[in-house]
Amino acid sequence: MLNSPFQLGPVTIPNRVLLSPLAGVSDVPFRRVCQELGAGLGYIEMLSAAGLPYGGRKLDELVARHPEEPLLGVQVTGATPEILKTGIEALHTHPVKMDTLDLNMGCPVKKVVKRGCGSAIVKDPVNAGNLVRAAREATDLPVTTKIRIGYNKLNLTVKEVCSELAKAGTTMLIIHGRVREDSYSDPVQYDQIKAGFDAARHAAGDSNIWMIGNGNIFDLASARRMVAETGCDGVLISRGCLGNPWIFKQVLEDSEVHPNLDEWLDVVMRHIDYHEEFYTEGRYAAIRFRKHLLWYVSGFPGSRALRGEIGNLDRMSQVRDALKAYAATLPSDFPRYGDQNEYKRTHDYDPKFEMDRSHDRGVEYYEDAE
Ligand SMILES: Cc1cc2nc3c(=O)[nH]c(=O)nc-3n(C[C@H](O)[C@H](O)[C@H](O)COP(=O)(O)O)c2cc1C
């Protein structure tokens, strides 16, 4: 089911395993790698509607598309219908072609919620619906929404928000099954995701809304669980693809098959090539790649020494050399990605499972917008 296409307005998405917008991560090179491994759709990271009219170099870097990128989604957040509309209109003066537009109503980052954006939006279901209406007026792209199930545990607004979003005409609803104050160690509330989907279906009447589940999808088993427990049409992969873009292939092919050493190295090297092509060789490119390298080798045998070295890699050529030298130490039959939660239990610290985004400084375009 997850490998069947679906339609967002005029746009055909080839499958239902989507790559999340990821601040500081879902750039052109990473999206290319994930789409080559099967991701049905890739997104630019969240942009601030309030900042969009000001443009700038950072925005040009973020709003970019490679000619071989099959589909591209953009994600915007704005506190009021007016700000959102102005922002989207400004975005459309940008030459890059986009295929779909998502409204972020889930970002927990302090400087974002402080301005009434991201997850602060789910506090007010009526405003959430009005934001969808404003976006639909400002763009011809299909408008979708990504929400959390509430702002805090005492006030789960998911049903009211989903109902308003459906009435306002969202074409796809992505629900991350946590509240804003949750950390990543808090469990995903599948029953609340399902309750949101049910409320949206009920409010939508005869029109179809695609329902996408999000949260803790790290492997085939957790993707299956999301589908089984929420009845979603598709899944959005977030931390699960950090250092593991093969997850798209595994979920799509419904198979536990993992890359062997050569295949693993081939993909990481390709990511490095794409990264260098986009950012060019230099310190900026190398620094941006460090986290990917950390994720690629996290939980791998003997990676501690390499992890210690990563902070000193200042050129892409050094990144390549360090990776090659490390790969040469791995046994060729080493299984790349098994149960990642198992890695978390049995190996040393894996940063991708513990990111605390409420203090995140990686929402790059928000910085510029202020
Ligand atoms: C580094 C990072 C950056 C993120 N950036 C965005 C973003 O720009 N837009 C968004 O909607 N969600 C963003 N998220 C949240 C994820 O899309 C997702 O909702 C959340 O991580 C829960 O899924 P997971 O448990 O599978 O990681 C980000 C998450 C991480 C870890």
Image (tube, grey):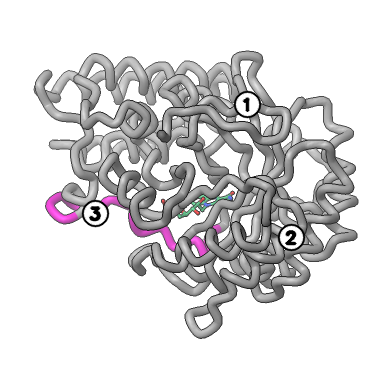
Marks 1 and 2 sit apart, C-alpha to C-alpha, by 23 Å
Marks 3 and 2 sit apart, C-alpha to C-alpha, by 44 Å
Residue 167 numbered tag? 2
Q: Residue 101: in sight, yes or no?
A: yes
Q: Is 314 colored magenta in this rendering? A: no
- Quadrant position of residue 244: top left
Query: Is 199 rendered above or below residue 220?
Result: below
Query: Is 131 rendered above or below residue 242?
Result: below
Q: Which residue is mark 3?
A: 349
* Boundaries of the magenta span: 345-360
In the picture, which quadrant includes the N terminus?
A: top left
From the viewer's perspective, is 73 left or right of 319?
A: right
Circle 2 SS class: helix
Q: Which residue is mark 1?
A: 12
| Residue toward you, 236 or 300 | 236
Residue 192 x/y as whole percent = 46, 68
- Quadrant position of residue 264: top left
Marks 3 and 1 sit apart, C-alpha to C-alpha, by 40 Å
